[in-house]
Each structure stands twice: as C-alpha cells, then as structure tokens.
Amino acid sequence: MKKFSMTFRLVLLVGMIIIANLNDRFLFAQNRKLTEMDKVILEREKEQEKIEDERARIIEERMELLLEQTLDGNVNPSEYMVGPGDLFSIYIWGNVNRQFEAIVSPEGNLEIPTVGSVFVGGSFLDEGRNKILVECKRIYHGVDISVTLTQLRRFRIYVTGNVFLPGTYPVRGVDRVSDAIEVAGGLRGFTDGSNILITSKDGTKRSFDYLKYVYEGDLTYNYLLTNGDVIHVSPLDWLGNLVTIETYDDRSGTFNLKEGENLTSLLMRTGVFARLSNANEIYVTRQNGNNEEVYHVGKAINDMDTFYPLSGDRIIIPILSPMVFVTGEVANPGPYPYIPDLTANDYVGYAGGVKLTGSMRSLKIIRDGLSLEKSSEIIVRRGDTVVISRKWTRVFRELFDVIFPFTSILLTAKAANLF
C-alpha cells in the first residue's frame, strides 16, 4: 500500500512538472505573440502615417506644379476663354511705335492706354484678340499690331464627391478636368469614374469619362476648366447593375455595368488588366438560385467578346506570379524573382542553401496545388513553390529531447525504489 502511494505521488509530481512546463511554454508563446502583434500594429500605424504624409506631399507638389506651369504655346485660341486676370501685351510699330500691357478687369474689360476700354470677358482667345485689333486700328492707321496673351489668369473651381480631398482649388484656363481630379487626390473607392459631371456657372452640364481618359488616353471630353466649374465625382449607382472584378492589385473593385456591355468592353473600360494579369484563366461566377455557376471565359478573346456579364457576377482575373517561393529548411525562405530555365536546386541556392535540419532528398515542388516529383533538377515555373522538409532524424531527435527528461525521472525513481 505504501509502495503504491509513493508511485502515485511520483506520477502526480511528474504530471505537475509536465503541466507546469507546458503552461510556461504556452504563456511564453502567448506573450511572444502579443508582443509581435503589438509590433505589427505599431508598424502598420507608422506605415499608414507615412502614406498619409506622402499623399499630402504629392498633392502639394501637384498643386505647385499646376500653378507654376508656364505658357508653353499649346493654348488653343478657339478653346481658351478670356477672363479676369488674363494679361495681354499689345505691340504697335510702323509710323508709331507703342507697347502696352493691360490686364482684364473683374468686369471683363481691357483698358488700353490711348485706345480705351475693350470688352473681352467670356470671349474665346481668337475672338478677344480680333476685338482688340479692331479697336487699336480705329486709333492707329498704317501700322502693324500684335496682340499676345502673356500671362494666364487664375480662378476657382470646386471638386466634390468621391475624391480624397474635395474642396476649392485655384486653376487656370489651360487646365483640364483630369488636372483638377488629380490635384484633389484622385478617385476614392466605389466610384463611377466613367460618369463625372461638370456643371458650369451658366448651368451647362457636361460629362467626362475619367477611366477612358486614364486607360485609353481619350482626350475627347477632357474639357478645359472655366471659372466656377463644379466637378462632381459620383459614387457607384447601387441600384443599377453591379459586377465585382477581383485581381491581384488595387485595380480590383465593384463597377457599374453598362447596358449591353460584353466582357471585353468591361475589362478595357475599367482598366483592370495589367502586365501580370493571366488573360487565359479568367473565371466568372454567377449565382443561380442556391447554385453557383462558373464560366471559364479566358481561353480566347472571342470568348470575352461573346460573353455578356450580368448584375451580381464575380469576375476573377488570376495573376501571372512574378515570383518563385522557397520554403522549409533553407537559410532564407521567402519569394524570389522568377528567372526562366532555372532549376529547383538554383532557387535553393538563392535561398542560402539547405540548413542542417533539412535535406535535398526531401525537396518537392508544388505547382497549381499539386506536388510534383522530388527532383532538384526539375525546371521551375513562374509561381511554383519549392519546399525543403525536415530530416526524419531531426524530427526523431526533437521528440527524444522532449521524452528524455521524463524517462530520466522515472529511471531515477525506480533506482530509489520509489515504486
């Protein structure tokens, strides 16, 4: 009975040691996780602050560049509208030599010495120049006259809606709608960039397809700004037809679907294609009652031309990964740039070689979710993962390191005749 009691006590003691040891390890691991999590959160907060500061700096630089840009000869006289603040230089030579500079007043008048007042406000540049020439020739005969716009006026416009920095901005008559949007920080998420509304002071309303301008370079409706213009960037029409496009970068998002639009037109209009987009593996998922239908429409351009998305469709564009991933028992696991014709052995070398705990014999390549043959000479493809596993002897040793202390306790207890 006494011997049984001693055995029970020893087992209880060993159990308590194991529990205490496991508990210490758990607490240590938990504290370490919390510490690492705090570090990650702090780093993310700092990174976000840097992003915000950088964004503010970029906006400020864009604003300065926009306002400091000089006249470069590209002003279209039939498009540029004269207004208060524009500076004209008038040169007269021949029988009489004169040179005048005059600025358009807030009322739209140009006061020219010896000539008088000429109303040019609201006129296009070529029309305003002709008005000035007519009035000058009425006073000066038998001379040559040159009228030049030498300084552009600045005026206020308003950018509202789904931009990062809505507000009032000073611009000039050569600046366009796209300039105002960029100065305001660009479009926010869930924005209908294809239907930006410009409302002028006289109530005239015009629309601008910003996406078409950005991704196709279409300048057709990238209008010159006029004094008092209100540029409104609308959010998505949540009551209309919506589709979601998922790809590997920030081009992903939700977009309004136009009536009768095929997949090719949608992808081109929204600009979601990038250099690494895998156009051959485009999938569309569509909910049909309780069932989800999947369409593979990326094998040929004809597939996309004849496929018409429906509201609620989810369009998935995979990535042509530019990296190869090396994991497991290597010195420096992680992603490495893909280089054609390199073997698994080459990538293991890039990762610093195999650690003592690993073995090249355990190498395997994972491709498209499948494990391939274990050969270090196999040619690696874009997006492959090279895995080096632990030696089985190492696993056995770690298991032995855990079991040995308890075995020693039991042997010691046996030698002491405790049970």
Image: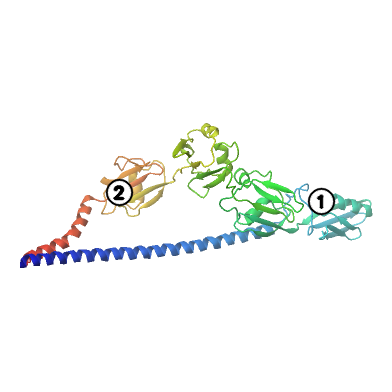
Q: Residue 256 placed where, x, y %? A: 58, 44
Q: Which mark is residue 205?
A: none
The secondary structure type at the circle numbered 1 is loop
What's under tag 2, amino acid-wise? Ile
**Relative to the observer, which residue lies in front, 327 or 10?**
10
Q: Quadrant of residue 227?
A: bottom right
Q: Is residue 114 above or below residue 212?
A: below
Taking the spot 26% from the left edge, 54% from the top edge, the residue there is: 357
Q: Residue at x 20, y 59 (%)?
A: 402
- Number of numbered markers: 2
The kind of secondary structure element at disc 2 is strand
Residue on which disc 1 sits: 123
Which of discs 1 and 2 lies nearer the camera? The answer is 1
Above or below for 390 versus 38: above
**x and y percent of residue 333 in the render?**
35, 53
Percent position of residue 198, x then y: 69, 50
Q: Quadrant of the image for the N terminus?
A: bottom left
Q: Earlier in the sequence, mark 1 or mark 2?
A: 1
- Which residue is labeled 2 in the image? 388
Q: Is residue 65 left or right of residue 318?
A: right
